[in-house]
Amino acid sequence: MSTAEATLVEVAAAPLVVESLVKRFGIVTAVDGISLELRAGECFGLLGPNGAGKSTLIRAVAGRVIPDSGRVAVFGFAAGSRQARAALGWVPQELALYPRLSARENLRSFGRYNGMRGKELEDSVAWCLHWASLQDRAGELTRNLSGGMKRRLNMAAGLIHHPRFVLLDEPTVGVDPQSRNRIFEMIEALRAQGMTIIYTTHYMEEAERLCDRIAIVDRGRIIALDAKEGLVRASFGERSQMVARFAGPADAVRAWVESRGGRMKEATAEFSADRPSEIGALLEAASAAGFELVDVSLRRPNLESVFLHLTGRELRD
Amino acid sequence: MILPIFRTAMTALRRDRAALALSFILPISFFAIFAIIFGSNRTSTPKVSLIVVDEDRSPASRDLVAGLEREESLNVRTAPPARKGAPVPQPYTAATAEAAVKAGDVSVALIIPQGFGAHPISFGPNAAGTQIEMLNDASDNIAPQMVSGLLQKAAMTSMPLDLAEQGMKYTEEYIGAFTPEQRKRMADNLDDLRQILDGRAADPGSSQGFDGLIRVEQRAVVGENKNNPMVSFYAAAIGVMFLLFTASGSAGSLLDESENGTLDRVLSSHINMTGLLAGKLLFNTLLAFVQLTVMYLFAWAVFKVDFFSHIPGFAVMGVCTALAVAAFGMLLASVCHTRAQLGALSTLLILTMSAIGGSMFPRVLMSDALKRAGLWTINAWAIDGFTKVFWYDQPVSTLWPQVTVLLSAAVALFAIARRLARRWEFA
């Protein structure tokens, strides 16, 4: 393929196309027939519990996993190809940095690994340090940086070569709320630049805040894919969730709640309600069964509710 | 794409000051200890390879050669070993025997000169026996003593006075008494002999006036002007052993990078696994070469090893050795899955290789089986090469066997390491 043809392919192609991807590790099927296509400039969330297959999918996109079957294309080029690697930035879940190098030296190293030299490299290092708010700590050894700073540097190292599509694999793991907010701001800055992003997390609030579309992944499959509102609507329609706590023997409460079509989540009972008026009837039934109501509230279902609804399991097992 | 990897590794090493210091201080410390302990004293009694040149070809010289060949602790050669398919080699001459000692093939050669058969035995203070010439390598001070002792074995060199007195006694007993004049002359002779033996007791190194039944003139043909033969040996021996340790430790950075995800990130850039390994090989080779250089400079400064006269040979052997040990380190890192595994395996392999390869004890003092086993180690070939350079003063061209083996080993080890590293390339 000539350079001009390659450029045309790149311009025309979607940032990512995954078709029927299957990856097995021994008897474990980590990715089980996933297909998806990303739109240019969108932030795409991969939401699922640990072990759901998110990281394997990400590694397949980065070209670091050979699929057993299926196809992955980045801007029309096979994952792992030189063109795909040039267009892609990968921020792994681990702090993939050289601890005995400074923040600036780490960025320079990864820039050089991506073929950058001279002014282009130095400009890019300066941009990354600014983006990650690490200008003041640029000369600090990486091992001496705080956890949040390391996370930000880890992200910056994935963007040193100006990719157009970035994979963020749980970038907020192990950071404090303040650092998490800083990371959100960094990601929002990327979104504002039109960067295409895949964001994996098992924190639903992060996916709700950052992502245009969300794929819920469980046991190697995408079990739902839509914008947040679409996911909630598909699972719950216009229904709300009633959350109540009852006083009484736990086993008896659980048996009664399940007999009424609800679920117990720790000491809390959750019911789906089409209309607010259903609450009165439910409370009367509880009283008739001998359970005293402690408190009750009505709320719109969220992504966690969707996940629970779809899988019957908590998001963070 | 190789240089960035090299540069990163160099910066990382500079930051790890403890590792940096250890990689230079430890080998020097061990080298100094070994050089001091073994530099002047060696006490083992190995089987000695000996070249015998019989220029006399008399019954007496043939008996002597046969007697030496019967000695179990001697490996007597009268001609170079026959090679398969090649013509039967000519027996050694004085010149070829001397060349063999100079080349380090054997430590000792005996030249039995023409006329030996006419006067084989020298007895008494004014003995006129023909001298056998013993050529030796001064780096081995055990072998000449063994050969010398075995040569005199049948001649009872320790009892000349007793032999003489007993001889007089039995002569008077069975033949008749000596005249006063005969008795005086015999007494004078015995006094002379007693004085000589008393003098030898006071100075055990002296052989004045009495050299045993067979007279031997010893001449060092290698290393006569060198300071301490064992120092240059241990510079190479200890140096190579620690290069192996350093190389395996440094190559272990692959495991760290694999564990913390850096390897994945690097491999998702423009660098492929071959470039990554080659960059690390280059760095580890340079590190090993600098270590060797520092070691020899230390040997030059402290133990007077003549470093600056041997720079071409050192450079050739240094580069080949550094490359081989670096490739060995890469292989170990590729085989292991964790640092702990690497630590255990490298310690085991390196100490074993060092033991049989001559880093801890000279291979010349080992059994033939161990010597052969040693040829499977980097240590043996590296030490042989450095010994050729620093002890035998041989030109660079003679290093071709060591260079060939070390470079081949480097290529083979790196190729295997590359093959094993496929596990890091893709899951």
Image (spheres, coloured by chain):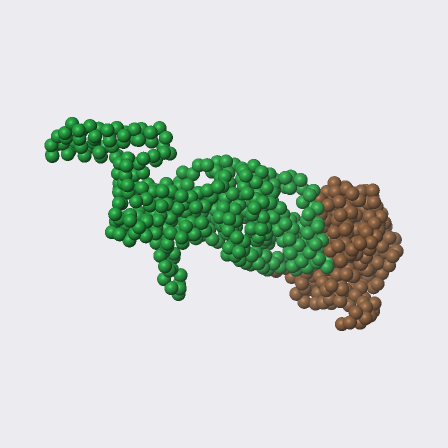
Chain colours: A brown, B green
Q: Is residue B411 above or below residue B8?
A: below
Residue at image position (83%, 49%) is: A126
Classify residue B333 as left or right of residue B85. Answer: right
Q: State the image quarter where residue A134 is shown.
A: top right
Question: Where in the figure is residue B53, as x and y percent of width and height?
Answer: 34, 52
- Residue sitting at 27 percent across and 39 percent down? B127
Q: Could one spot residue A219 in this view of the protein?
A: no
Q: For residue B26, what is the image quadrant?
A: top right
Q: In this view, does B423 lie above or below B206?
A: below
Residue A296's place in the image compared with B398, above or below, is: above
Of residue B250 and residue B268, the one placed in the foreground of this image is B250
Residue closer to the observer: B32 or B130 = B130
**Vertical side of B35 occupied by A63: above or below:** below
Q: State which quarter of the image contains the N terminus of chain A.
A: bottom right
Q: How many marks?
A: 0
Measured as percent of width and height from the top left, residue B327 is found at 58, 54
State left or right for residue A225 relative to residue B354. right
Query: In the image, is B220 to the left or to the right of A15?
Result: left
* Residue B389 or residue A316, whichever sits in front: B389
Residue A115 in view, yes or no = yes
Q: Is residue B126 left or right of residue B18?
A: left
Q: Residue at x 37, y 55 (%)?
A: B92
Percent across and percent down for residue B147 are 35, 44
Residue drawn at x 70%, y 50% as measured from the top left: B7
Instruction: Please provide percent x and percent y for residue B415.
Output: 58, 59
